[in-house]
Image: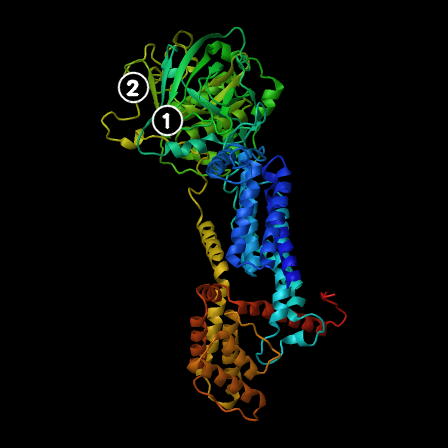
Amino acid sequence: MISSLARLTVRAWAATLLAACALLPLVESTIWILQAALLLGVQAGVGAAARRVPLARPLTVAAQVVVTLMLLTPMFAREQAVAGLIPGPDALRFFGQLLEQGGQDVNRYAIPAPLSDGIRLMLVGGVLVIGLLVDTLAVTFRSAAPAGLPLLALYSVAAGLTDNGIEWLWFLLAAAGYLMLLLAEGRDRLSQWGRVFAGPPRGRSRETPGAPAPARFGHRIGAVALGIALVVPLALPAMDGGLLDPDGRGVGAGVGGGGTISAVNPLVSLRDSLNNDDDRAVFSVRTEMENTSDLYLRIVSLDDFDGTTWKPSKRAITQVPEGFPAPPGLGPDVEFTEVGTSISVAKWYGQTWLPMPYPPSRVSVRGDWRYEPVGMTLVGDHGQNTRGLTYEVRSLDVRPTAEQLAKAPEPPADVLREYTELPDSLPAVVAETARDVTDGAKSDYDRAVMMQDWFALSGNFQYDTQVDVGSGSQAIARFLKDKRGFCVHYSFAMASMARSLGIPARIAVGFAPGTPQADGTVSVAMRDAHAWPELYFEGVGWTRFEPTPTRGSTPDYTVQDVQDNGPVDPARPSQAAPADPSAAPSQSTDCRADGSDPGACESESPEAALASDGGGPKWHVVLLWALAGLLVLALPLSPMLWRTRMRAVRLGGLGRGRGEEDVAPRVLAAWEELTDTAWDHGIAPDESLTPRGVADRIVRTGGLEGDAAASVRRLAGAVEQVLYAPRPRPVAGLAEDVRRAAGALRDSASRAGRLRALLLPRSAVRVVWTASDRWASLRDRVIALRPDWHLPTRQRG
């Protein structure tokens, strides 16, 4: 017994470690898995020692918990621990802080993320917790089957976070560990069960020498189960992404002065704060800028387009410089002035990126921030965010002219290559629409202005925050057809169209100009959250355009000059920014001041994707997900459901058929139900005993008395008649005898024993035996038809 427990302990340790390998792609360093393997081994060794003493099961688990905590303490909280080893209140609080930091790091870093202390604690501690559950279930309580649930949870976390194309490898490792654990436990348990007395022999199992049938078929069953596990997911809906979708992960910086920031869509991180009914103030801004209608607070730019959504590329980061370099593309001939802006952030708004006017030239901010040079953005490190901050930004107020933009030379080759890239999945109608809208344009500047005017003025587009959002290759095409949406739709579409024309483009995300206040400040609220396209012009750099109607302000350099071009469009004057901003909020021409159309002025909530082609999930997708959900719910309950069904079939058949030919199957069905019920309550069957010996064992071990004991003995007598009498007599009351004995077995069992018999009945192994016998029968028939065929069999060597 000691050797079997030791073998099972090693298998539980190995199974947990194999499942933990699925977490390897999540972080850059793999040193954590060596630490986890070592600590997991110590934890398993403590359990093995406690079981050898032996300690009670709860005490064994408690000892492992205490030792696990004492192992983690010197590794993560030595300074806070008593004597550097014993976890006191300070150490426990520090563990909580590290876990909170780890959660923030998970939301901030790209995959693979740097191995911060918080992430390392989550990985090592999580593996130890899973390992403790597996060891407790499989070894301490000798029930390997339910140990697959924590292993599945460990694998599922990794599968939900990674998208590297080799998830099948990690699944195979986890599945191999689980099957190895099942076989180790099953070899010991099933060899003790023997074969249940239940009528005729089961197929070839009695004819083939060697190991008992369950052990002999173990590898075969494992292969079938693994095959089913690999094939079934192909019929279920694909789960793109996971807990943290690759298109919507959190943002963050590297450790110390270097590292990377992730390919994250910040619209997702803004969404939770924006989707509120109350229009709370986010920033209070005081600026030296003369025209506050141009005061856009830019958070980050999205420059990577995959056909479904835009997101920022993964970029290297550095320490925040004393003075920022000149923005890319800005030439000496363009007029600009440096202005100062003071920004105070609401205490409830925790944004990891630092909102700033673009392009910044100097930032004075407290906290741990890092600088991304390409986008000229600041991102928080080690949990740093904007909550309650007040900071100063010096930025350039760039004022190019239309002539400078129209005469801009061709951008550098690397800019063209990176910022005009489009996926093959983008519908052709996007480029066709861009060419139609810009027909007759003489320069990229003219094309950009014509696209902006088409969206904002002449294209009959309507600003609508109620448009359904989703994703798909046809998303932009649908928006161009329906002509309804909000800032994300307009900016995504214009940037995509610009790239199709060879104009470098990206999306900026942040806040549009807020509302001037009487004290000279500007209040920026949640409804000012915004996205807009930026197009690159050599000599000017990244230049803002505003295609979204009723939001933001149209840049002065995109308004046609009256002297150069004659009479202007009568709609134009409403687009120009006022020379002297009013202290009162301005009313949009499309938002009714009387409030008769409140939907036209609702707060927008930017989303990370455009409207899908179907306007929502298809019915078959919903149906498949519902079936998948039912399957997930049914799997843990399948042993109980099967056992309930078998009981109903066996006992239900006892009331039918009164002829002599029906006596044997009815008696054997009742006897099999009785022995299975005893088996479920821990009385393992022993086929070496006679029916009367089995009855005495059930009565004695189950503590049965009176009518219950008499019922068991009556059933044994009926079985003896079937086996030995020339003409067995019909026996009445078989079902009542079985129910009476089963009730007595339940009453004599503990609460945990009753629960185990209900949810995880041991007799459910008959399903495995039945499958094995059917496979053996099928193999025999095939061999009989084609004697020259030799199907592979696996014997125990």
Which residue is at a point 44% across and 32% down the rendered structure image? Answer: 269
Name the amino acid, label 2: Ser
Q: Nearer the viewer, residue 738 or 577?
A: 738
Q: Nearer the viewer, mark 2 or mark 1?
A: 1
**Hey, which quadrant is residue 584 in on the image?**
top left
- Residue 172 at least partly seen: no
Q: Is residue 673 above or below residue 148?
A: below
Applied colour scheme: rainbow
Q: Nearer the viewer, residue 684 or 380?
A: 684
Q: Residue furthest bottom?
A: 726
User: Residue 405: x percent and y percent?
Assistant: 50, 13
Q: Which mark is residue 124?
A: none
Category of crowding for the residue at label 1, using alpha-carbon neighbours closer than 10 angstroms: few (below 14), some (14–19), many (at least 20) = few
Q: Toward the viewer: 321 or 494? A: 321
Q: Which residue is mark 1?
A: 347
Q: How far across and how far down the image is residue 308, in percent?
A: 51, 35
Label 2 vs label 1: CA separation?
27 Å
Q: Is residue 543 left or right of residue 773?
A: left
Say what amino acid the circle numbered 1 marks: Lys
Q: Which mark is residue 586?
A: 2
Give whichever of 119, 378 is nearer the camera: 119
